Amino acid sequence: MELSMLIFMTCFAAVVVSSVLIAAHIDSKNEQLLIAEVEREEKNL
């Protein structure tokens, strides 16, 4: 019983950590795209 609970908690923690990492990765990519867009607009002015 306790072993299956431990496995479940470990899997749950892994899912949470990976989703947080993926979200942070997407955020940083969006930020880089926004920065590139702003720089392009500044060059056009």
Image (cartoon, grey):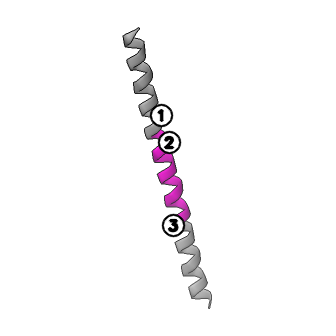
Q: Mark 1 points at which residue?
A: 31
Badge 1 amino acid: Glu
Q: Name the residue under label 3.
A: 14
Q: Which quadrant, please, contains the C terminus?
A: top left
Q: Where is residue 29 in the image (x, y as percent from the top left)?
A: 43, 39
Looking at the image, is 10 positioned above or below residue 27?
Answer: below
Distance between mark 1 and mark 2 Cα atoms = 6 Å
- Give whichever of 2, 12 is nearer the camera: 12
Badge 2 amino acid: Asp
Instruction: Check disc 1 and report its element: helix, strand or loop.
Output: helix
Q: How crowded is mark 2: few (under 14 residues within 10 Å), some or many (20 or more)?
A: few
Looking at the image, is 43 positioned above or below residue 21?
Answer: above
Magenta span contains residue 19? yes
Indicate left or right for 37 with 8 as reference.
Answer: left
Distance between mark 3 and mark 1 Cα atoms = 26 Å
Instruction: Check disc 2 and report its element: helix, strand or loop.
Output: helix
Q: Which quadrant, please, contains the N terminus?
A: bottom right
Q: Which of the numbered marks, if any, corresponds to residue 27?
A: 2
Which residue is drawn at the image coordinates 62% and 87% (left, top)?
Answer: 2
- Give whichever of 28, 42 is nearer the camera: 42
Counting residues from the start of the chain, the first of labels 3 and 1 encountered is 3
Residue depth check, mark 3 versus mark 2: number of the one nearer the observer: 2
Counting residues from the start of the chain, the first of labels 3 and 2 encountered is 3
Find out whether the residues at labels 1 and 2 contact each other: C-beta distance under 8 Å.
yes
Which residue is drawn at the image coordinates 57% and 87% (left, top)?
Answer: 3
| Direction bottom: furthest residue | 1
Q: Residues within 10 Å of mark 3 (few under 14, many from 20)?
A: few
Magenta span contains residue 17? yes
Give the magenta range.
Answer: 15-28
Which residue is drawn at the image coordinates 52% and 73% (left, top)?
Answer: 11
Badge 3 amino acid: Ala
Q: Position of residue 23 (x, y in %)?
A: 51, 50
